[in-house]
Amino acid sequence: MSLNCDFVRSHGLGNDYLVMDPSFELTPERTRIICHRNTGVGSDGILVVAKNSGADFAVRILNPDGSEAEKSGNGLRIFSKFLYDHGYTKKTEFTIHTLGGIVNSRLILEAGRVIAVRVDMGKAVIDRQLTKLEVAGTTLNVTSLSVGNPHCVTIVPDLEAVDLFKFGPLIENHPAFPKRTNVQFAQVLDHANIRALIWERGAGHTLASGSSSCAVATACFDKGLVDGHVTVQMEGGNLTIELDQQLNLVMTGPVEEVCTGNFSAELRHRLKLHSR
């Protein structure tokens, strides 16, 4: 199976990705050129159809800065819908290999159209040693954890008082995280609802994030602030997260395809590709 266009553009709650099944190598430089918001196609990352590795399908997740992510919740929902919509599978439940582990994905259809996806995101692991972080002269109480990729959650009483664009990059690149980290600030509204702001490693501010929602829900659940079925409210919209006492996570949320497209001759030249 191959794609009859250069890319499919989709988003999950405003977190947008290009899905590609390219015949050329997506180097970090090519990834940066394609993802650039002003001079490229523009996106929060690229999802690349990869060779199967112990699962039904496999995906590589490339950040706009050219680095590679282990896992992406929104990316997995987008990739799952892509596989069904573009003829890679007729199944509505299948497994996907990521660098952060194999996940199980189940499509939710309405009138034959994939409107949402439910993904088993695996088990969260909390770093019990790292509970405080010194950032710009401020001591933050944090929860450092992995859901297949790294996260640092700070629970605050008022999200409006958070300067995400100041603290996001400082925490992402903090010496405590040699491989950098995803950053979330969370405000608990009640035992079933959390608000969150997202700063993603390698991408910066994003409107929503599936793995970040899992991290936020885990941090709040671990402190007894929420129950095992929560809605994480982000700037782009809401995701439902379910978790148990062992911190196994299931994420459910919407996904939408925006368009398909091809690179122009000029962009292909900048990418050092042969013209069609």
Image (spheres, helix red, strand yellow):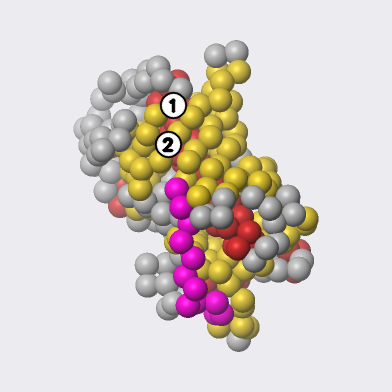
Q: As drawn, is 40 to the left or to the right of 221?
A: left
Q: Contact, CB < 8 Å: mark 1 with mark 2?
A: yes
User: Could you tell me the amino acid type at mark 1?
Assistant: Glu
Which residue sits at x=58%, y=38%? 252
Residue 176 in percent (x, y) is at: 44, 77
Residue 98 or 219: which is nearer the viewer?
219
Amino acid type of the residue tagged 2 in the rendering = Asn
Q: Secondary structure at mark 1?
A: strand
| Residue 203, x across and y down, in percent | 48, 55
**Residue at the extreme top of the image, as rendered:** 111
Figure quadrant of residue 109: top right
Q: Which residue is mark 2?
A: 104
Decide if residue 9 is in sight here.
no
Q: Quadrant of the C terminus?
A: top left
Q: Give the residue furthest to the front.
A: 245
Span of residues in magenta: 122-133
Estimate the x, y position of residue 7 in percent, counting from the top left: 39, 31
| Of pointers 1 and 2, the one earlier in the residue sequence | 1
Of the numbered discs in the image, which one, if any, rests on residue 93?
A: 1
Q: Residue at x 46, y 52 (%)?
A: 123
Q: Position of residue 249 (x, y in %)?
A: 52, 48
